[in-house]
């Protein structure tokens, strides 16, 4: 682009007009050469082909028997998309405000804004419910293809050039190492992959004073789609805008005007997205802290290794963009056809952003000052985008000369030499890299030749170069994706796609469902961390970035198990908590054979029923905070919520495999794996309880199995404690106390664990039945829940006094009223929703108001007014200019 044309592009609308426009000139003939549309289609086609080919090579779903559902994709994203399918088809418990299926009732708008507000998510509605895995896969591929198309369009907007080369580099961006290593199974992050080139396009529009209304809408759309990666993309777009301004060098007045337009555009766009962004922000503010790992920058050899094809690791940035793009980016500083300021500006930006990933303060800046849980380099797609943009600037100024190409090849060889010291570069990486490097160098060399230099060929060297470079891109990207898919499968937990197990669970739950009279729990033996969303029912299981702290602390105090630092709560097979939370039906499934953790042959899916009180009960005691009332024993904490004493906590005698008392730490007695030569003895716990009581074992820091000795039909308790995964084991039922009253529990530890004091609780089932009768007699006679899930109403017996308790966690946002009285913030009864009663009202109503929604709506309304004012102002100016 010439300097005169670029200055004209930066002029404001008021400066470009002022005289009567001339009569329209005849329309020129259509340009037969392919344009941005064809280039974008080429990029999308390359991307789709590579993704599908790589999955076929890796034998991954849907092209092979190996599941692609790993980690949070199986535990969170697919279940949330299944829940969206249910909502769109009018199924499921709850609505947009409250999700009654998970976590005994949790705010849904934060989860919606985090996982499901991408427009691509709506595509799940056209798939059958039992093909939800395929629906999510199609959404993933479409997102990555759209990212390729958007980057291609941006490249041609930044600089004119060869259309096929723009498509090639657009696909390089979409298929970067970050995408195949992290984005492909965190599909909501892929919206950020699309957002970055779109926001850069918005920056281009603000430079030229064009499309202000569309720019605002694009900003709002990408922030609504996924605010987390949109934040990173916004920072990157701002850096690109500053570089573009500095390279254009307009007068200060025009530069400030362009920056002002950009700030206004992004402010209005963020304002329009505020209703959802604010709800997500406050949802995160009330969430359980989870687990965090201390940031440690990777070494230079590992960092450079991730530039090469077929390398993978969870904890390093995947900055692979293809050998062709990398060579072009490396050649930019030496490409004399490009202006010096262009070479210096883009090169310095790429280096600065790479270094910013390695410095803790700027690393936190990229992640909105919140240390990420899990993969630490989530901003890596920004580096990949800048590398591709730098590569495009190299190619758009003309073919590389020998000096530039030789320098780039030398730097590439140096990168390979340093990377060879990294364990991430395996033997199979070298053939792929060498073939890709040779092909890329040959293709770039052909681009510098003219047709006359190859007289024996009937096609231009550029056509051969295009075929060669696209072939290189297809091969190395497919290989990298396939290797990454296999490596991720071996390194992470994986889950089976929808099959017979899930269908049987869903059918059993649908048959037993009685909501809102009682809850139906999908069961302790979960398939994924969000079973209620995937197979139905209303249980404690819930895994989200917005799992509330009050919910996590309450259930942890009751003996529930969890992973991910108490952000993923599990179900608990316990009679008392079933009564407290009105779980009237419970599914018992055999352990998931796909997990291969514990197999038990001959076990079938069953459903047990329990007589439970309604969701709203009446207690005589006043509301109490869970933080003040809960103690160290989950048995006593359960009794606090139940309102009566039902457990006996016997004195325990614990012996290790050598028959001696184990050593003690601050949590209890240490139980390790028996050593060889112990005669096959197992560690034991002995105690005495009343015959016929139900036996429970609570050992949150124990890993292994426990079984009641002498009871052939007693269940085996499986304890899943893993400190590396921030995982706590749930309380387990072990059967009934034998007629002798003496019980012996045999332990089979997998690793060093702890048996706490008072680990055994013996439940008096007769007392529990009496408690249930009392709660039913004084509890609600009818409970209804609104279609949106945000309002629950209960009819109480006349003259009810004390405290009405809703069997749901008292998360922020609940407001309650009695009778026709005004709403007030709900009280708390040991972590549950509580409403004081005066004896004169027989109706209790609790409505949920998502925190941040009112503030966000106010800001959004102001932004909408500003946007309308901007549109009216532009229309008025046009009417004044045009006759």
Image (cartoon, rainbow, N blue to C red):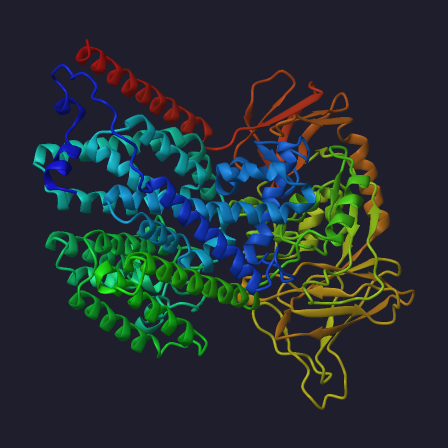
Q: Where is residue 754? Give x, y as percent.
A: 63, 70
Regarding residue 117, the answer to whether it shows in the image is no
Q: Residue at x 38, y 33 (%)?
A: 220
Query: Whole-percent x and y of residue 93?
Result: 68, 35
Seen from the viewer's position, the closer of residues 690 and 495 is: 495
| Left or right: residue 73 compared with residue 798 | left
Say which quadrant the C terminus sits in.
Answer: top left
With 704 as the anchor, is 882 left or right in this view? left
Q: Is residue 108 visible?
A: yes
Position of 284 relative to 57 (above/below)? above
Q: Residue pushed farthest left?
A: 251
Residue for point 44% across, 77% down? 426
- Seen at 79% across and 66% down, the residue is 600
x 69%, y 18%: residue? 840
Instruction: Check the image and name the residue furthest to the right.
Output: 739
Q: Is residue 841 left or right of residue 629?
A: right
Pinpoint residue 815: horizontal percent, then vertical percent. 56, 28
x and y percentages locating residue 174 in the rendered image: 40, 52
The quarter of the displayed image where residue 651 is located: bottom right
Q: Is residue 426 above or below residue 592?
A: below
Query: 381 or 550, which lies in front?
Result: 381
Left-right relation of 773 to 387? right
- Image height of 450 relative to 777, above or below: below
- Out of 270 and 327, give the one closest to the viewer: 327
């Amino acid at each position: 682009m010439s300097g005169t044309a670029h200055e004209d592009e930066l002029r404001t609308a008021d400066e470009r007009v002022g005289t009567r426009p001339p009569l329209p000139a005849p329309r020129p003939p259509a340009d037969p050469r392919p344009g941005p549309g064809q280039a974008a289609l080429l990029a999308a086609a390359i991307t789709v082909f590579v993704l599908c080919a790589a999955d076929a090579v890796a034998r991954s779903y849907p092209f092979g028997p190996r599941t692609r559902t790993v980690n949070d994709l199986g535990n969170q994203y697919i279940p949330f998309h299944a829940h969206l399918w249910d909502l769109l088809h009018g199924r499921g418990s709850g609505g947009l405000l409250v999700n009654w299926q998970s976590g005994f009732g949790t705010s849904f708008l934060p989860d919606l804004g985090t996982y499901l507000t991408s427009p691509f998510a709506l595509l799940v509605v056209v798939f059958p419910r039992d093909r939800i895995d395929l629906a999510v896969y199609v959404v993933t591929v479409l997102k990555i293809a759209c990212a390729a198309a958007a980057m291609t369009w941006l490249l041609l907007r930044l600089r004119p050039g060869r259309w096929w080369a723009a498509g090639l580099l657009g696909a390089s961006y979409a298929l970067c190492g970050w995408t195949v290593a992290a984005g492909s199974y965190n599909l909501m992050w892929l919206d950020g992959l699309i957002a970055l080139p779109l926001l850069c396009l918005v920056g281009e529009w603000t430079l030229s004073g064009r499309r202000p209304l569309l720019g605002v809408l694009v900003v709002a759309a990408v922030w609504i789609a996924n605010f987390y990666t949109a934040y990173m993309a916004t920072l990157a777009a701002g850096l690109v805008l500053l570089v573009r301004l500095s390279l254009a060098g307009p007068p200060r007045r025009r530069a400030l005007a362009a920056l002002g337009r950009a700030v206004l555009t992004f402010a209005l766009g963020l304002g329009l997205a505020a209703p959802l962004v604010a709800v997500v922000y406050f949802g995160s503010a009330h969430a359980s802290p989870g687990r965090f790992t201390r940031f440690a920058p990777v070494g230079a050899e590992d960092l450079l290794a991730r530039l090469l094809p077929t390398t993978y690791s969870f904890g390093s940035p995947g900055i692979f963009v293809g050998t062709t793009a990398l060579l072009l980016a490396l050649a930019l500083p030496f490409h004399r056809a490009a202006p010096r300021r262009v070479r210096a500006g883009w090169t310095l930006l790429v280096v600065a952003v790479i270094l910013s990933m390695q410095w803790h303060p700027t690393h936190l800046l990229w992640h909105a000052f919140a240390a990420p849980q899990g993969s630490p380099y989530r901003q890596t797609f920004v580096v990949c985008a800048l590398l591709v943009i730098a590569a495009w600037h190299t190619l758009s100024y003309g073919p590389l000369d020998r000096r530039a190409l030789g320098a780039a090849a030398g730097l590439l060889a140096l990168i390979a030499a340093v990377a060879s010291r990294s364990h991430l570069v395996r033997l199979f990486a070298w053939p792929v890299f060498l073939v890709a490097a040779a092909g890329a160098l040959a293709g770039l060399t052909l681009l510098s030749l003219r047709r006359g230099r190859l007289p024996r060929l009937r096609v231009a060297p550029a056509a051969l170069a295009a075929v060669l470079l696209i072939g290189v891109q297809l091969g190395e990207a497919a290989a990298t994706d396939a290797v990454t898919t296999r490596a991720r499968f071996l390194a992470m937990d994986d889950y089976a796609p929808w099959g017979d197990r899930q269908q049987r669970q869903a059918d059993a739950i649908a048959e037993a469902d009685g909501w809102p009279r009682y809850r139906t729990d999908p069961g302790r033996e979960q398939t994924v961390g969000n079973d209620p969303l995937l197979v139905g029912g209303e249980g404690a299981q819930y895994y989200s970035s917005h799992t509330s702290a009050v919910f996590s602390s309450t259930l942890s105090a009751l003996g529930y198990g969890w992973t991910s630092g108490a952000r993923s709560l599990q179900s608990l097979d316990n009679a008392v908590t079933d009564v407290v939370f009105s779980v009237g039906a419970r599914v018992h499934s055999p352990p998931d054979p796909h997990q291969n953790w514990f197999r038990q042959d001959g076990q079938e899916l069953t459903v047990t029923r329990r007589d439970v009180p309604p969701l709203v009960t009446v207690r005589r005691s006043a509301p109490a905070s869970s933080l003040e009332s809960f103690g160290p024993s989950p048995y006593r904490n359960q009794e606090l919520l139940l309102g009566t004493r039902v457990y006996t906590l016997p004195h325990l005698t614990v012996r290790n495999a050598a028959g001696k008392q184990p050593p003690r730490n601050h949590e209890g007695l240490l139980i390790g794996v028996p050593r060889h030569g112990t005669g096959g003895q197992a560690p034991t716990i002995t105690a005495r309880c009343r015959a016929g009581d139900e036996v429970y074992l609570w050992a949150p820091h124990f890993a292994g199995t426990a079984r009641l000795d002498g009871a052939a039909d007693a269940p085996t308790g499986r304890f899943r404690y893993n400190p590396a995964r921030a995982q706590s084991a749930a309380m387990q039922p072990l059967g009934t106390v034998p007629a002798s009253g003496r019980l012996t529990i045999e332990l089979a530890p997998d690793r060093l664990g702890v048996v706490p004091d008072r680990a055994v609780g013996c439940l008096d089932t007769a007392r529990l039945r009496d408690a249930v009768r009392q709660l039913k007699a004084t509890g609600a006679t009818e409970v209804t829940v609104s279609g949106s899930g945000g309002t629950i109403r209960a009819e109480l017996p006349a003259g009810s006094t004390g405290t009405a308790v809703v069997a749901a966690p008292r998360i922020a946002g609940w407001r309650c009223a009695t009778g026709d009285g005004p709403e007030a913030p709900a009280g708390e009864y040991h972590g549950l929703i509580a409403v004081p009663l005066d004896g004169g009202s027989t109706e209790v109503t609790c409505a949920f108001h998502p925190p941040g929604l009112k503030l966000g709506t106010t800001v959004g309304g102001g932004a909408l007014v500003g946007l309308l004012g901007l549109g009216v102002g532009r229309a008025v100016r046009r009417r004044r200019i045009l006759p």
